[in-house]
Amino acid sequence: MGQCLRYQMHWEDLEEYQALTFLTRNEILCIHDTFLKLCPVGKCYKEVTLTMEQVNPFRDRICKVFSHNNVFSFEDVLGMASVFSEQACPSLKIEYAFRIYDFNENGFIDEEDLQKIVLRLLDSDDVSEDLMTDLIHHVLSEADLDNDNMLSFSEFEHAMAKSPDFMTSFRIHFWGC
C-alpha cells in the first residue's frame, strides 16, 4: 500500500493549480490544509481516502486511478477533486469514470467489470445469478453498439452522454470545501 507524499504549497503554486484545475483558490487552499492534517508522514493513502469519502463503493478504484506508483500526492488529490467537481467538463468525467469502472484494466468494460460494478452498487455479494445476468444483458443491449459483449471507450462515452444523471452523480465533495 502506498504512502502519502506531503507537500508544502507555496503561494506561487496556487495560481498554477487554479489554472490547471476546475477548482477555486479557496477550494485548493481548503483541500491542501485538510490533506496535510489527514496525511501525516507514514499514513497510507487508502486510509486518507477512506477518511475523506467513506460511502463511495469505488474508493479503492478511485485511489488506484488517481495515485502514481502507489503514492498519493497533493497534486493527485487536486486532480481527483478537479475531475469530481461540478465545473469539470463531461468528457473529462467520462474518461475517468471509464478508467475507474475498467477493473481489469483491459481497455474495455466487459462482463467481469460490469459484474463488479453491480455488486458494488448494490452493496452485496449475494445477487442471484439470474438477476446479475439480466442486469449485464440489459446494460450491454443498451450500450454495446458492436455486439462484442463489452463496452469500448466510445460506446461508454456514447451511453454516458445520453445519461441525464451522469454529470450530477459523478461528483465528490471533498472535506467540506
Image (cartoon, rainbow, N blue to C red):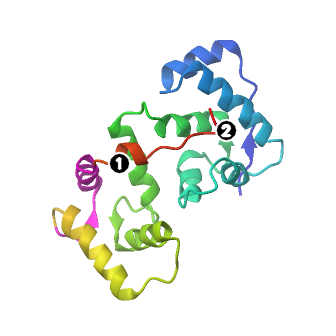
* Amino acid type, label 2: Ser
Residue pictured at 64% horizontal, 36% vertical: 176
Query: Mark 2 or mark 1: which comes first in sequence?
Result: 2
The quadrant the N terminus occupies is bottom right
Residue wearing tag 2: 73
Residue 75 as seen in the image, left or right of residue 148: right
Q: Secondary structure at mark 1?
A: helix
* Residue 149 covered by magenta stretch: yes
Residue 87 as seen in the image, left or right of residue 71: left
Residue wearing tag 1: 166
Residue pictured at 58% horizontal, 14% vertical: 15
Q: Calculate the distance from the C-alpha at mark 2 to the C-alpha at mark 1.
A: 27 Å
Residue pictured at 29% horizontal, 79% vertical: 134
Residue 73 position (above or below residue 151): above
Residue pictured at 71% horizontal, 17% vertical: 10
Residue 154 position (above or below residue 125): above
How many neighbours does mark 2 have within 10 angstroms: few (below 14), some (14-19), or many (20 or more)?
A: many
Q: Do we see residue 149 in this rendering? A: no
Residue 121 percent location from the top left of the image: 46, 66
Furthest residue in direction left, as rendered: 146
